[in-house]
Amino acid sequence: MFGSDNESSATLKTLADTLADSVNGYRDAAEHVDNSQYKELFVSLADQRDRALRDLNKLLYAEGADPDRDGTTLGHLHQRWLDFKASITGRDDKAVINEVERGEDYLKEKFEAALKLDSLEGEARFAIENAYNSVREGHDRVSALKRSLEERASH
């Protein structure tokens, strides 16, 4: 299903773990912002990512893998950093949005690197491309939000 070697399977597992981090990160960010529009955006993006994650996990289950729904250690560290930063800045929405964008940059790079793999084919490539669409859209929305905040601050 994934191709001729385990590279595609390992890539799919890594991306699923990283998407789980993204879901957790968005839910965490929604708890740390005061602005209700930002909360709504982050919850919506978490739900969208969760759907993409479920699609990747279906393929992993079909291959006999047991996806880790808790995400990666790096993701947990990032969430703790968000918690720490929010406590120091007094729940500064801009600081949370900056951290979310940083996470989005990382996630987008992971997916772009995976899509360059020649060994990625069939259902795995299709599922990763679909998940990447969610990643790219979320990245672009968060980047636009950050730019908007920066423009308002400079006026």
Image (tube, rainbow, N blue to C red):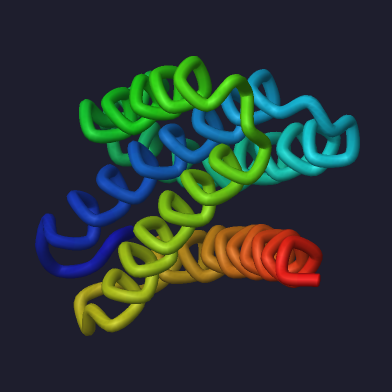
Quarter that holds the C terminus: bottom right
Q: Residue at x 52, y 55 (%)?
A: 101
Against 95, residue 126 (above or below) is below
Q: Give the image location of residue 22, x and y in percent.
A: 49, 40
Q: Nearer the viewer, residue 45 or 124?
A: 45
Q: Which quarter of the picture shows residue 61?
A: top left
Q: Which quarter of the picture shows residue 84?
A: top left
Q: Residue at x 53, y 41 (%)?
A: 53
Q: Give the image location of residue 50, x and y in percent.
A: 62, 36
| Outermost right residue | 37
Quarter that holds the N terminus: bottom left
**Direction from residue 122 to residue 54 in the image, left or right:** right
| Outermost front residue | 155
Q: Which quarter of the picture shows residue 140?
A: bottom right
Q: Give the image location of residue 21, x and y in percent.
A: 42, 34
Against 144, residue 70 (above or below) is above
**Direction from residue 116 to residue 88 in the image, left or right:** right
Q: Residue at x 23, y 67 (%)?
A: 3
Q: Residue at x 35, y 20 (%)?
A: 80
The answer to whether residue 137 shows anywhere in this view is no
Q: Give the image location of residue 5, x and y in percent.
A: 10, 63
The answer to whether residue 129 shows anywhere in this view is yes
Q: Nearer the viewer, residue 125 or 75?
A: 75
**Direction from residue 129 to residue 4 in the image, left or right:** left
